[in-house]
Image (cartoon, rainbow, N blue to C red):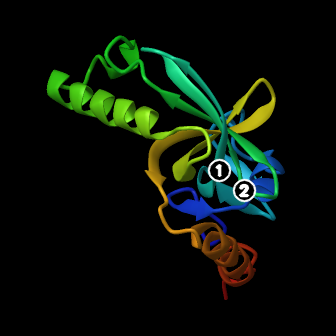
Amino acid sequence: MADNLNTTHVKLLAFDLLSLSPNPTDPSSSSSSFCRKGKNLSRAEILGFVVTRDLKPGKFLRFTIDDGTGCIPCVLWLNQLTSSYFSKRSPSSVRSIARLASNFASQTQLGAVARVRGKITRYRDLVQLTVSDVVLEPDPNAQVLHWLDCVRLAKKCYDKVFFIL
């Protein structure tokens, strides 16, 4: 399907991410699929400064990324070792996932410039990002380059209308 970007982490600016609406054609649209100009999205990549940080050890890290166009709420789950969601996976892989999440949480500090990827979800009627990975950006130009990527990709890929003949 040409209008489906569900399998890709789409680079978005905060104002685009926060304006997404649930996909009206998806029966499970409450949390799994969103629309942007007729394109289906479920994953995103954002980049900006960490401006808030609320850690609940063993449960989650809630933080906010500010990219200059808005603030994006993010949640990184840290409950892999106690959650029933992971009960069918091998203990070694669950420990590995928990270590990675703990590592991401320790890197995510106030004032850091972070590239965050994850699943677009809704919590209390607000769009948020459920984090799958965090990478700190040492390059001071990273945020400007991300903005340029977002504009270029929106123009060439995300907003492009495909016709099937």
Q: Amino acid at mark 2?
A: Asp
The percent position of residue 102, horizontal first and vertical second, equals: 37, 29
The percent position of residue 124, horizontal first and vertical second, equals: 78, 23
Left or right, residue 49 beside residue 126: left
The percent position of residue 162, horizontal first and vertical second, equals: 70, 81
Around disc 2, counting alpha carbons within 10 Å, would you say few (fewer than 14), some (14 to 19), or many (20 or more)? many
Left or right, residue 81 beside residue 107: left
Name the image quarter holding residue 4. bottom right
Q: Establish if 97 lies above or below 1.
A: above
At 67% from the left and 88% from the top, the residue drawn is 165
At 31% from the left and 16% from the top, the residue drawn is 81
The tag on residue 49 is 1
Q: Establish if 40 lies above or below 92.
A: below
Q: Secondary structure at mark 2?
A: loop
Residue wearing tag 2: 67
User: Who comes first in sequence, dot 1 or dot 2?
Assistant: 1
Q: Establish if 50 lies above or below 106.
A: below
At 68% from the left and 78% from the top, the residue drawn is 148
Left or right, residue 80 beside residue 135: left
Instruction: Give the camera-side residue of 62 and 90.
Output: 62
Q: Establish if 35 lies above or below 27.
A: below
Q: Amino acid at mark 1?
A: Phe
Asked if the residues shown at circle 1 and circle 2 are in contact, with their CB atoms under 8 angstroms apart, the answer is: yes
The tag on residue 158 is none
Instruction: Give the camera-side residue of 89 and 78.
Output: 78
Q: Secondary structure at mark 1?
A: strand
At 62% from the left and 56% from the top, the residue drawn is 46
Quadrant where the image shows the N terminus: bottom right
Q: Residue furthest bottom?
A: 165
